[in-house]
Structures are given as structure tokens and as C-alpha cells.
Image (cartoon, grey):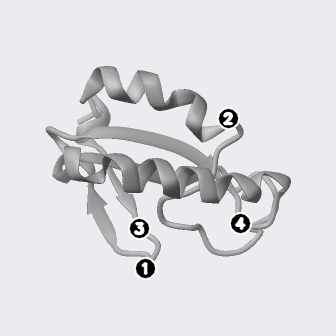
Amino acid sequence: MAAKNFFDFTVKNIKNQDWNLNELKGKVVLVVNVASKCGFTKQYAGLEELYQQYKDKDFVIVGAPCNQFGGQGNVVQRYASTTEPKSIAPEIEKLL
């Protein structure tokens, strides 16, 4: 059966264990493409700041690797983006 929405997927977490995204239902979820050794790792600090600001309002950040760069190392659990993290704060605020 094909997944109908985001919450229908089961993916591998950083420990290579199955993780059912249904666990995130009811939360505001930001999914970001990550690579642990690329030029955008400087964005991690801003995403961490964003997460700390909204984590008590059921906000989570999920890092999803694309693996197009030859497996550059382990995925960081809730960091990384090509967009300046603080610039998306107003959009997150609307969802909370």
C-alpha cells in the first residue's frame, strides 16, 4: 500500500532503526535536507536556536539526508538547511 501522506512513512533513524513518522502527528514538523560535511553546516547553530525557541510548542526538526554526495558521514539528527533558519521563524509562528 502506498503512503498517502508524510505520517504514513517509516524511515531509518540515525541508529538505523525503523521510525514511523506517525509519531510526529500533531506536531509542527520542519524537514531539512542534511549533509554533515558540506558548506551549509554553519546553519546548524541557527536551526538549533530555532528548535530551542519552539520545542515546547510541539515543534520538531527532522534531518533527512539525500546521500547524493557520496555518504559524507552520519546525519545530524535535527539540524541543517540551505535557508537561514531565523528567516523561517515567522512561518513557524503561524503554525504554532
Q: Amino acid at mark 3?
A: Asn
Residue, x 43% and y 79% (percent of image)?
Answer: 15
Tag 3 secondary structure: loop
Q: Secondary structure at mark 2?
A: loop
- For the residue marked with disc 2, what is the amino acid? Thr
Q: CA distance from mark 1 to mark 2?
A: 26 Å
**Residue 24: x and y, percent?**
22, 48
State the mark number for residue 13. Answer: 3
Q: Earlier in the sequence, mark 3 or mark 2?
A: 3
Which dot, 2 or 4, sits closer to the camera?
2
Q: CA distance from mark 3 to mark 2?
A: 23 Å
Q: Quadrant of the C terminus?
A: top left
Question: Mark 4 to mark 3: distance in Å?
Answer: 15 Å
Dot 1 falls on a residue whose secondary structure is loop
Q: Quarter-wise, where is residue 91 in the image? A: top left
Residue at mark 1 to residue at mark 3: CA–CA distance:
5 Å
Rendered location of residue 93, percent (x, y): 34, 27
- The three-letter code of the residue at mark 4 reads Ser
User: Would residue 21 be found to the left or right of residue 61 on screen?
Assistant: left
Which residue is pictured at 23% across the width and 36% down the height? 1
Residue of label 2: 83
Depth check: give the residue in front, 87 or 62. 87
The disc, 1 or 4, on the residue closer to the chain's N-terminal end is 1
Q: Provide the residue designation for mark 4.
A: 36
Q: Residues within 10 Å of mark 1 (few under 14, many from 20)?
A: few
Q: Secondary structure at mark 4?
A: loop
Tell me if label 1 and label 4 are in contact, CB under 8 Å.
no
The disc at residue 15 is 1
Q: Which kind of residue does numbered mark 1 sit on?
A: Lys
Mark 2 surroundings within 10 Å by alpha-carbon count, few (fewer than 14), some (14 through 19), many (20 or more): few
Residue 87 position within the rendered picture, expressed as x and y whole percent measured from the top left: 59, 29
Q: Check if mark 1's residue and mark 3's residue have beta carbons within 8 Å.
A: yes
